[in-house]
Image (cartoon, grey):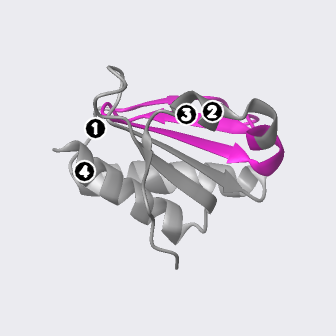
Amino acid sequence: MTSKEILAFTLKAISDRHGEDTAAYDMQGYSILADYYVVTSAGSNRQLHAIANTIIDEAHKADFYDYRVEGSSESNWLLLDLGDVVVNVFTEEARDFYNVEKLWADGKKLELEED
């Protein structure tokens, strides 16, 4: 499965669960760790976990099982490592606090379609 296909089902899952202020960065040529980094916000801890679970469900529908999830049921930040795509799902407060997007400043921010 290509990194673009993984990115596509990831963005669909985020949209389906109403992730907020979603951003994706093309890091090809800048990072050896992943081709794409995605970040989105959730209005609550419950929504944060719903977004992550929907990404996993979409991965399974695509017959993709090579992923890891970091964080716990009480976390305000979950990281989904899908190999060539790394997804960070935050509560709004945690996203503001950690400001991980500054790490991807060299990458190309992708234009995403709004719902």
Write the start and end of the magenta stretch as one range. Answer: 67-95
- Closest to the camera, between mark 4 and mark 2, is 2
Q: Mark 4 or mark 2, which has the lower sequence index?
A: 4
In the image, which disc is placed on residue 65? 1
Corner quadrant of residue 101: top right
- Closest to the camera, between mark 4 and mark 3, is 4
31 to 78, vertically: above or below: above
Camera-side residue of 12 and 112: 112
User: Residue at 44% of width from left, 52% of height from top?
Assistant: 55
- Closest to the camera, between mark 3 and mark 1, is 3
Q: Residues within 10 Å of mark 2 (few under 14, many from 20)?
A: few
Name the kind of residue labelled 4 in the image.
Lys
67 to 95, vertically: above or below: above
Q: Label 2, label 3: how many angstroms apart (C-alpha)?
A: 16 Å
Query: To which residue does mark 3 refer?
Result: 79
Among all residues in the image, which is located at the extreme bottom? Answer: 115
For the N terminus, the image quarter is top left
